[in-house]
Amino acid sequence: MFKLGKFIRLVPHPVFLGFVNGLAMVIFLAQLEHFKTAEGWVTNSALLVMGGLILLTMAIIHFLPKLTTAIPSTLVAIVTGSVLAIVLNLDTKTVGDMASISGNLPDFAIPNIPFTLETLYIILPYSIILALIGLIESLLTLNLVDELTETTGKPNKECIGQGVANTVTGFFGGMGGCAMVGQSIINIKSGGRGRLSGFVAGSFLLSFILLFSQYIEQIPIAVLVGVMFIVVIGTFEWCSFKLISRVPLADSIVGISVAVITVFTDLAIAVIVGVLMSAIVFSWNHAKQIYTETSIDEKSGIKTYKLNGPLFFASAQNFQSLFDLSQDPNEVYVDFNNSKVMDHSAIKAIDKLAERYQKAGKILHLIHLTAECKLLLKTAKGLVEVNVLEDPTYHVADDKLA
C-alpha cells in the first residue's frame, strides 16, 4: 500500500553479495548440527552411512539434469536415497526421529486478546520489526531470483501478497512467514518459474502433512542435508573471492561485514548496517570531490570561483576552505553551474560564506543557483543573481520545503 518495496533499490550490490554469502554460510552451519548426537559428533559407521547418502544425493542432483530435465533431480535424489536406506535397512537418522509432521487442518479463530492501548504498545514494536525483517529477506530473495532468471519482479506486489497472507494465516493459528532463499533456489534449479510452482509446492506440503506423513518421516536426514549442501553451493557467490582484489577496499569490507553479521546476528541488522556503511563511504568519497577553478578578469579585477562537485553535509566544511578571503579582490563571483546544492547543510555553508565576505567588506555574487536555493538562503539571499535561461532546476532536501 505504501509502495515501500521501491526502497530495496537503496541496497548496494556489496550488501547484496554479503547477504547472499552470509545466508549460504548460515544454511551450511545449520546442517552441521545433524552431524551431532547426544554424546557428541557422529563417528565410525554412522558417519560413513551419513556421508555416503549425502554424496549420493549431491551427485544425483548435480549430474541428472545433464541427462534429463523431465523429472526434478532433487525429487529423484530424495526418493533414491530414501528407498536405498529402507531397502538396505541403514542405521541413519530420519525425519521421524526429529519430530512428527502429521497434523490436521487448522480451525478459524479470532485471536482472544484484549484490544487495548496497553496490548498495542506490547505488540506493535515486535510486529514492525518482524514485518521489516520479512520484507527485507523477501525483497532480497526477489532480487536474487531476478538475477538467476534474468527477469524483473514486482516488489510492491510481493509486499502486499506477503502482508495479506500473514494476516490471513494468523486467523488459523499460523506463524508469519516470508520468502526463503534455499527453497527459492531449489525451485528455480528444478525448472520452476511461475506462481504455479509455489502453489503446487504448498499443496503437496499440505497433502504430506494430512495424508502421507508416515512416508515423509522415513526420509533420511542425510538426504536432506545433501540437498541443502547443493543449495549452499548454488547460493554462495564464488565470484566474490575474485572481486575482493578488483573492487574498492571499502566495498570489500562492506560485503565481508554483512556476511559476518548475517551469520552471528540476523539478516535485518546485517542489511541495515551494510546500507549505513555504504552510505558513509559514499558520503566520504563525494565530500572529497568538491573543488574550485579560479579566474581573474584582468580589466575589472573581478575574481570568479567556478565550483565543481556536489555541495552537501559531508562537503560543506571543505567548501569553506576553498575560498581565500584575505587575498580575494573586493568583488567576487561564485559560479554554481557545475555544482549541485543538495541539502540544508549546503544552504548553511553558502550563508556562512556570505557572512564572511560581508564582514570583510567585500562584494559576493552567487550565480547559477536554483530558485529553491534562493528561497532557503537568509544572509546570501540578496546576493543571488537570477538568470532564467541559464539557472538549473533541481530540488534541495530541506524540511523547510515540506
Image: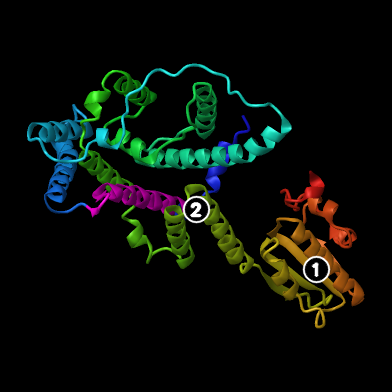
Q: Magenta residues: mostly which secondary structure?
A: helix
Q: Is residue 160 depicted above or below 12 in this figure?
A: above
Q: Position of residue 61 (x, y in %)?
A: 19, 39
Residue pointed to by mark 1:
333
Find residue 325 and report its image quarter: bottom right
Q: Give the residue at x 44% y 38%.
A: 142
> Type of residue at label 1?
Tyr
**N-term-proximal mark, 1 vs 2:** 2
Q: Mark 1 near mark 2, Cβ–Cβ under 8 Å? A: no
Query: In the rendered structure, does residue 27 fall within the stretch colored magenta?
Result: yes
Q: Position of residue 211 (x, y in %)?
A: 28, 18
Q: Position of residue 354 (x, y in %)?
A: 85, 68
Find residue 307 and report its image quarter: bottom right
Q: Is residue 216 left or right of residue 127?
A: left
Secondary structure beneath dot 2 equals helix
Q: The N terminus is located in which quarter?
A: top right
Residue pointed to by mark 2:
270
**Camera-nearest label, 1 or 2:** 2
Q: Position of residue 326 (x, y in %)?
A: 82, 82
Q: Give the residue at x 11% y 39%.
A: 90
The local crowd at label 2, few if under 14, some if 14 to 19, many if 20 or more residues have their Cα within 10 Å, is many
Q: Is residue 324 left or right of residue 39?
A: right
Secondary structure beneath dot 1 equals strand
Nearer to me, 8 or 395? 8
Q: Give the residue at x 37% y 38%.
A: 150
* Residue 388 seen by the camera: no
Q: Which residues are magenta?
A: 15-41
Instruction: State how many labels appear.
Output: 2
* Residue 311 seen by the camera: yes
Nearer to me, 40 or 289? 40
Query: In the rendered structure, does residue 257 fall within the stretch colored magenta?
Result: no
